[in-house]
């Protein structure tokens, strides 16, 4: 099939405004209903087109039968004035009406009008790029093989053999065009480490399909070969870049740019001597010093047996000396002592978790991070969040009371921030960071109640894989435990930040992760969390 100018491509260029869908799985789920509408519109279009084609087939059959039966003896047939009249009429107007019919255009315009009605709810170019980056993030953090991802499997190499990291209940395989778009996103960011791997799969799949192009595709075998050849050139593999360019010329022999590249690569190979064998290298990272630890902790998914190695860690029924907990103590699991990190099991009910999510949904916005005195979105935090006041729903006020009872801290605003509810997106994560402010100009101090002394985080949902909370310097991670809450101190008793609390939200591999954060500030805790007599404690 000859490839026309891509209508999708032009739409992506026109509607390249900021996208938000990929940052929250809730929005991705909502997109399903939009596509259902598009399916209905397309079904209507097909029905109308079938009716139109049936009319054309009926006309074709009628005229063909006249030529095979009535006009076998032309002189005898045309001697009849009725036959002559119908021939002249048909050639003058019927064929004209058929050839220049606007019905096909009207059907197409109706489909496009219906599509445009839904455009505001469709993903933007940034969503497509963000989703592709999410796949590459999962590939890196969990050491997943691209060839396995393409087949709908989540596997990594273990002792030279591919092993399943997780077996999802539902999955899909990726097409050559799917892989091309992921590779193209990396290519446009000059990230040739990822573009090579994804474009290799794209070329393989396009070749397997015989190079046939489908109308819904953005790319083709020629496009994939073109991008892959240059990616290999940029990584120093000139000989393979030459081979791919020569293959591309078989499909497009008059491509002047590719002809110039072939000439350039041949000269480089003659002049350069033995080929470089540096191999592919991952792009540098803002958290490069802790990347290996971070990814290792994410890959363990909280399975490291620290409790068995450290006899000082324990589980108990905890009351905090409060009368309200004497008859119904909380199940406490002490996960770490320095920093002090504890998990409270079954802290909330399923109904409470759903109520919190429902209250938060209308206010969900792209999560931000501190950027000097202001706040801004960042690629190292992919999620949406909403701030919920205690007055929004009775469950929020009850939650504050329960947190205060359990911790002994004053969590009422402004001594505690409003509850922040977070929903993670595709490959949603939050790279290593501190919850407490590390700069006096941080927005954390706008409440004028000091720094964040403690964090109380609730898991409002479960996930199938990934999404652990990794404490980088403390060298342990905590898996998502539905309806549980995790608590830790961010500051030492002298008010200094505890560097051991550097932590990260690992990318969600499979699942829909919801958490709620309650950040408690220094002021208001003077009698609940006293300073030590030792200034360095």
Image (cartoon, rainbow, N blue to C red):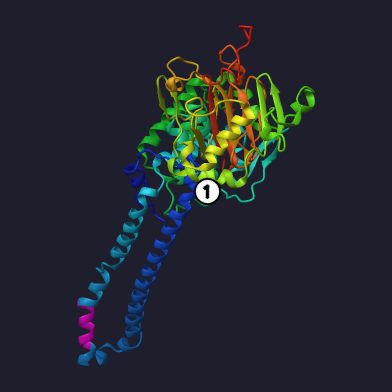
The one nearer the camera, 34 or 310, is 310
On the rendered image, what quadrant is the N terminus found in? bottom left
- What residue is rendered at 37% in x and 35% in y? 257
Residue 526 position in % (x across, y down): 56, 17
Place of residue 86 in the rendered image (x, y in percent of width and height, measured from the top left)? 23, 85
- With 371 as the anchor, is 518 left or right in this view? right
**With respect to residue 29, does 334 lie above or below?**
above
Q: Is residue 82 above or below residue 329?
A: below
Image quadrant where one finds the C terminus: top right
- Decide if residue 247 is in sight here: no
Residue beneath disc 1: 175
Confirm whether the magenta stretch covers residue 85.
yes
Q: Secondary structure at mark 1?
A: loop
On the question of residue 523 being in view, the answer is yes
Is 413 left or right of 2, judged from the image as shown? right
Q: In the picture shown, does residue 43 fall above or below 348?
A: below
Residue 44 falls in image quadrant:
bottom left
- Residues in magenta, as a range: 84-92
Choose between 228 and 171: the one closer to the eye.
Answer: 171
Q: Is residue 118 above or below residue 454?
A: below
Q: Residue at x 47, y 44 (%)?
A: 361
| Overall secondary structure of the magenta section | helix
């Amino acid at each position: 099939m000859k490839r026309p100018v891509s209508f999708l491509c032009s739409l992506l260029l026109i509607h390249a405004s900021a996208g938000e869908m990929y940052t929250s799985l809730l929005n991705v789920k909502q997109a399903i209903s939009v596509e259902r509408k598009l399916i209905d519109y397309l079904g209507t279009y097909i029905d109308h087109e079938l009716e139109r084609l049936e009319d054309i087939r009926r006309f074709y059959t009628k005229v063909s039968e006249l030529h095979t039966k009535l006009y076998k003896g032309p002189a005898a047939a045309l001697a009849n004035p009725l036959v002559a009249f119908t021939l002249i009429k048909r050639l003058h107007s019927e064929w004209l009406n058929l050839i220049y019919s606007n019905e096909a255009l009207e059907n197409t315009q109706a489909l496009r009008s219906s599509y445009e009605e839904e455009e505001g709810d469709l993903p933007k170019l940034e969503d497509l790029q963000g989703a592709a980056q999410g796949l590459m993030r999962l590939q890196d953090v969990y050491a997943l093989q691209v060839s396995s991802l393409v087949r709908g499997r989540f596997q990594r190499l273990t002792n030279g053999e591919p092993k399943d990291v997780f077996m999802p209940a539902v999955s899909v395989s990726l097409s050559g065009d799917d892989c091309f778009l992921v590779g193209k996103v990396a290519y446009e960011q000059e990230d040739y480490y990822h573009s090579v791997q994804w474009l290799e799969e794209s070329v393989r799949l396009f070749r397997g399909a015989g190079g046939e192009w489908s109308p819904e595709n953005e790319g083709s075998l020629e496009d994939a070969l073109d991008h892959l050849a240059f990616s290999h050139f940029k990584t120093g593999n000139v000989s393979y870049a030459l081979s791919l360019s020569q293959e591309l010329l078989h499909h497009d022999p008059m491509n002047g740019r590719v002809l110039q590249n072939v000439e350039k690569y041949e000269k480089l190979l003659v002049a350069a001597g033995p080929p470089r064998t540096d191999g592919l290298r991952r792009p540098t990272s803002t958290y490069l010093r802790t990347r290996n630890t971070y990814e290792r902790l994410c890959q363990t998914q909280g399975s490291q047996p620290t409790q068995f190695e450290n006899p000082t860690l324990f589980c108990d029924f905890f009351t905090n000396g409060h009368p309200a907990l004497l008859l119904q103590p909380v199940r406490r699991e002490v996960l770490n002592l320095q920093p002090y990190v504890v998990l409270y099991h079954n802290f909330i009910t399923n109904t409470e978790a759903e109520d919190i999510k429902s209250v938060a949904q209308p206010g969900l916005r792209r999560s931000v991070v501190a950027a000097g005195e202001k706040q801004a979105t960042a690629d190292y935090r992919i999620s949406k969040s909403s701030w919920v006041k205690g007055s929004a729903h009775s469950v929020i006020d009850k939650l504050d009371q329960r947190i205060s009872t359990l911790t002994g801290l004053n969590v009422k605003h402004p001594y505690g921030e409003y509850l922040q509810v977070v929903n993670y997106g595709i490959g949603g994560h939050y790279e290593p960071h501190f919850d407490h402010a590390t700069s006096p100009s941080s927005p954390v101090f706008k409440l004028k109640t000091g720094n964040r002394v403690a964090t109380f985080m609730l898991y409002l949902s479960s996930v199938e894989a990934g999404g652990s909370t990794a404490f980088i310097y403390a060298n342990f991670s905590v898996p998502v435990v539905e309806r549980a809450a995790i608590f830790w101190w961010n500051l030492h008793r002298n008010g200094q930040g505890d560097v051991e609390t550097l932590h990260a939200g690992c990318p969600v591999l499979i699942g829909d992760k919801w958490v709620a954060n309650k950040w408690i500030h220094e002021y208001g805790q003077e009698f609940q969390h006293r300073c030590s007599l030792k200034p360095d404690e």
